Amino acid sequence: MTATPVERPLIELRDVQKLYKLGGEGVRALNGVSVTINHGEMVAIVGPSGSGKSTLMHILGCLDRPTSGSYVLDGGDVQSYGDDALAEIRRAKIGFVFQQFNLLPRMTALQNVFLPMIYTRAKERERRAMESLERVGLGHRAGHRPTELSGGEQQRVAIARALVNKPPVLLADEPTGNLDTKVGAAIMEVFRQLNAEDGITVILITHDPTVSASARRVISMRDGAVVSDVKQAGAKA
């Protein structure tokens, strides 16, 4: 069953600026970014090196704060949150998937997946972790360590880990960057299914046109600003 995107804002950025101090001089990484992303969308944020897309990713993921402007996530004013509240937002509302899989080599796939639930009871933790692995087609590899898994399988474990707390948002930074074309396409199919069937909002940060082609909407950045925001009717669903 395909989930239909809800025309209700999940993410609202208004005139977001980000200024860094480098060598006594200010460098403007974001210059007045205003973007709204609704529940259930699948969005790619693209741009060349230095365009500001990585800075935007850090702000969307509550890993950094804007210098000015506003960020509302799921109805909450992110700018008003303290560090503990931001950590809870990252745990409960945002699942992170990175180019480097960031799996702990001595732990099994199952143990890597339940790491975000460290304070959950053991039986519940293992049950939910196994459900998450099965959702990405890797339940049969739960007892294997990362060195015993292919690159595509490791990325599926990383996606399962990002899903385990049932966040409304998956934020993926170059998720196919370490994978060959065939395996990368299979990983993109996992994201499409999670978006279409589970209604998870997927945000892809990428420079790869084959990745952005999978999104229903592409936001292009240059010099710290949004230069286009286009819905793609032909994107794979």
Image (cartoon, rainbow, N blue to C red):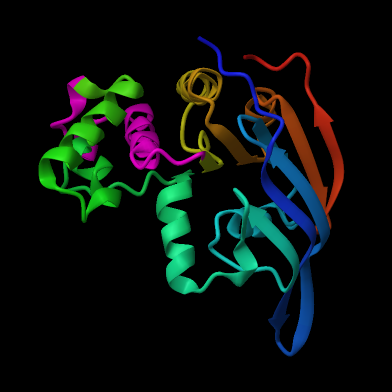
- Decide whether residue 147 is among the magenta residues: yes
- Image spot of residue 23 (x, y percent): 71, 87
Residue 132 visible: yes
As drawn, 64 above or below 50 = below
As drawn, 59 above or below 48 = below
- Image spot of residue 120 (x, y percent): 20, 50
Residue 227 is drawn in which quadrant?
top right
Residue in the foreground of this view, choosing between 134 and 1:
1
Residue in the foreground of this view, choosing between 140 and 149:
140
> Residue at the location (19% across, 20% down)?
140
> Residue at the location (35% across, 49% down)?
102
> Residue at the location (66% across, 47% down)?
11
On the rendered structure, is 52 left or right of 154?
right
On the rendered structure, is 99 left or right of 16?
left
Residue 162 is drawn in which quadrant?
top left
Q: Residue furthest top?
A: 1
Residue segment shown in magenta: 140-168
